[in-house]
Image (spheres, grey):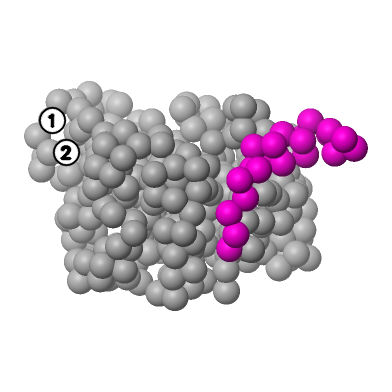
């Protein structure tokens, strides 16, 4: 079964209900959100009524909780403990974020492993392991999905890095992996040979650890270490290669999430990207279709 969706907003006034409504407006059956602004750690209390109404609307529309993902804010950096108070703050924040997932009923949380900044890489990776062991408790049911990264600057998040982290974490049931096609491409993984990559992944980590896939095209060449997402079929990976990832039999039932850029920074393209994914047919009018739909120029 294809579970496809996108990044959606989660606002303090509309809560989960707003996220579900946005998801339905894209004809999606999966979604991902930040529980607050991704670049800061200010969080408003969760509105229980909106959570209840959101869960009810999900049920009515056959959206399963397994296909709902929370993305941890990207400022959390468990790798860097140069300032111990900042590192402890990051651990505490991650713990609170897990508690928020529990309140919402969300089972999967995507986390960027971190950046070593000025530290030795091995030491930095060990900080991530320590952080996760600090934060996770034995009866946690959350699965923290470490995201494969573009390896921009001092980013940690190659397959080998992720394997080392998983090996060091005590509660292995609470760790999974999120593949991001743009990040993989930018890190040097050729998506046109995706099955070879999956073979390698399976040998190193085990394919069953993959719990979420971020489907994005890339603005940059293979191995560029840039991390700039592009709309589906409009980048260097290309439509057919992304379709092969989305419909890969070994990744059936795993939620696929779009994090592609808005058109003119204002209009979400997801309704039309999801449509072309379901049709398996590239739409070269994505920009104008999106623009017209949200500008209300449909009558033209
Ligand atoms: Fe991410
Ligand atoms: Fe991503
Ligand atoms: Zn990215």
Kindly identify which numbered label has been placed on residue 240: none
Q: Which residues are magenta?
A: 280-300
- Residue 129 is left or right of residue 73, and the answer is left
**Tally of numbered discs:** 2
Q: Can you see residue 46?
A: no
Residue at image location 43% in from the left, 63% down from the top = 245
Q: Are marks 2 and 1 in contact (CB under 8 Å)?
A: yes
Per the model, the C-alpha gap separating discs 2 and 1 is 6 Å
Residue at image location 21% in from the left, 32% down from the top = 154
For disc 1, does the CB lie below 8 Å from ligand 1? no
User: Split into 4 quadrants, where in the image is the C terminus?
Assistant: top right
Q: Identify residue for label 2.
A: 124
Q: Label 1 crowding class (10 Å Cα cut-off): few <14, some 14-19, many 20+?
A: some
Residue at image location 56% in from the left, 40% down from the top = 35
- Residue 148 is left or right of residue 291, and the answer is left
Q: Secondary structure at mark 2?
A: helix
Q: Secondary structure at mark 1?
A: loop
Q: Identify residue for label 1.
A: 119
């Amino acid at each position: 079964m294809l579970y496809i969706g996108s990044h959606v907003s989660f606002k303090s006034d509309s809560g989960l209900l707003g996220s579900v409504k946005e998801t339905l407006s894209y004809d999606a059956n999966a979604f991902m959100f930040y529980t607050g602004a991704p670049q800061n750690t200010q969080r408003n209390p969760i509105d229980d009524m909106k959570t209840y109404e959101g869960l009810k609307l999900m049920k009515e529309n056959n959206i399963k909780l397994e296909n709902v993902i929370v993305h941890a804010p990207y400022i959390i950096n468990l790798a860097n403990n140069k300032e111990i108070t900042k590192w402890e703050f990051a651990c505490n924040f991650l713990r609170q974020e897990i508690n928020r997932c529990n309140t919402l009923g969300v089972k999967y949380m995507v986390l960027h492993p971190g950046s070593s900044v000025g530290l030795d890489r091995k030491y930095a990776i060990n900080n991530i392991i320590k952080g996760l062991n600090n934060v996770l408790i034995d009866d946690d049911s959350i699965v923290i999905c470490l995201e494969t990264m573009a390896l921009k600057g001092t980013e940690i998040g190659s397959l080998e890095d992720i394997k080392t982290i998983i090996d060091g974490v005590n509660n292995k049931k609470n760790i999974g992996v999120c593949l991001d096609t743009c990040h993989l491409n930018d890190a040097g993984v050729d998506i046109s040979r995706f099955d070879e990559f999956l073979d390698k992944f399976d040998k190193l980590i085990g394919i069953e650890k993959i719990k979420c896939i971020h489907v994005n095209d890339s603005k940059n060449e293979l191995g560029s270490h840039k991390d700039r997402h592009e709309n589906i079929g409009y980048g260097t990976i290309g439509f057919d290669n992304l379709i092969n990832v989305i419909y890969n039999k070994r990744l059936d039932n795993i939620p696929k999430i779009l994090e592609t850029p808005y058109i003119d920074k204002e209009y979400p393209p997801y309704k039309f990207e999801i449509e072309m994914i379901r049709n398996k047919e590239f739409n070269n009018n994505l920009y104008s279709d999106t623009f017209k739909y949200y500008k209300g120029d449909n009558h033209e």
